[in-house]
Image (cartoon, rainbow, N blue to C red):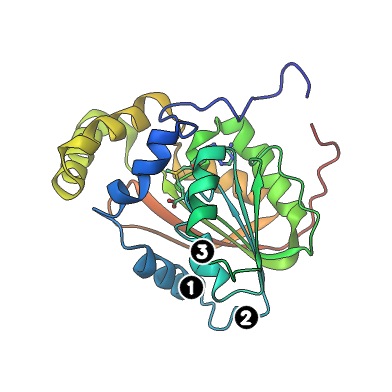
Amino acid sequence: MRSWQYDEFRHCGVDYSQVEQAEAYDEQHQQFRDYGKEFRGMLEFLDLRDPTDKTVIDLGCGTGATALLAAAMFKTVYAVDVSHAMLERARAKADRNTRNITFVKAGFLTYDHGGEAADLVITKAAFHHLPDFWKQIALLRMNGMMKTGGQLYIHDVVFQFDPRHYAGKIDAWIARFAAVAGGKFTAEVETHIRDEYSTFGWILEKMIANAGFIVEKVTSDDGFVTEYACRKVADVGLGETA
Ligand SMILES: C[S@@+](CC[C@H](N)C(=O)[O-])C[C@H]1O[C@@H](n2cnc3c(N)ncnc32)[C@H](O)[C@@H]1O
């Protein structure tokens, strides 16, 4: 690794390398998330009716909220995360008979996909861990892991509001979040805004286009949590890998 390379294993903001964080994750998140409903919603959003012959890579898979459900439907699943602790939780939850899922300790900038080119790359609530420059590099790397015509699903906090009103927008969003997820989560959301790297929609959309994708669908109910359905339309060929 070059000395200027971003170290994606050094967690920014919430530290998912901590065993306690990984152990508490599902209980905390299931207070405001329904993994099954989210998964079905994602398939519908992507218009994916029969994924049984498809290969998917989940980058930043965490405790397997999506990857484990995908294993029951997709042909092959690669579940990738920089946190050993999060991957261990995902592994522990995997059914002993689930043979079509491979867990890999790596990240957006370090995962080398050796398998069949993917039909679908997903990343959920993880992309904001990279600063913008490295998001662009990550998108170029994703392009290299996929078939042309394949889909990219990004689900993350992406700022869609007018930045002139940022303080009120952020305060209101945190208050709405606290009402749904409980006060305990407020500090985590504040950490997200302060120490992690969520960016503007117009920046992310330009980076997606630069990396050989078109955005087919975008939706955000609250100006923060955003879903993108993208399609790879060109092989961009990353000249050099770090
Ligand atoms: C909020 S959790 C989301 C986990 C899961 N996708 C979900 O929907 O529950 C963020 C995850 O991103 C992982 N992560 C952070 N930086 C990463 C990187 N550079 N590459 C891959 N995963 C990363 C963390 O270890 C953590 O498991």
List the residue tagged with mark 3. 68
**In which quadrant of the rendered image does the N terminus lie?**
top right
Q: Earlier in the sequence, mark 1 or mark 3?
A: 1
Q: Is residue 187 visible?
A: yes
Q: Earlier in the sequence, mark 1 or mark 2?
A: 1
- Distance from Cα at disc 3 to Cα at disc 2: 14 Å
Residue 158 shown left or right of residue 181 in the figure: right
List the residue tagged with mark 1. 43
Crowding near the residue tagged with mark 3, few <14, some 14–19, many ≥20 C-alpha atoms within 10 Å: many
Residue 42 in which image quadrant = bottom left
- Distance from Cα at disc 1 to Cα at disc 3: 14 Å
List the residue tagged with mark 2. 52
Q: Earlier in the sequence, mark 3 or mark 2?
A: 2
Crowding near the residue tagged with mark 1, few <14, some 14–19, many ≥20 C-alpha atoms within 10 Å: some
Q: What amino acid is labelled 3 in the image? A: Leu
Q: What amino acid is labelled 2 in the image? A: Thr
Q: Is mark 3 within 8 Å of ligand 1?
A: no
Crowding near the residue tagged with mark 2, few <14, some 14–19, many ≥20 C-alpha atoms within 10 Å: few
**CB atoms of marks 1 and 3 within 8 Å:** no
Q: What amino acid is labelled 1 in the image? A: Leu
Residue 189 in which image quadrant = top left
Q: Position of residue 10 (x, y in %)?
A: 56, 25
Element at label 2: loop
Q: Residue at x 40, y 70 (%)?
A: 41
Residue 195 in which image quadrant = top left
Residue 151 shown left or right of residue 111 in the figure: left
Q: Residue at x 38, y 34 (%)?
A: 20
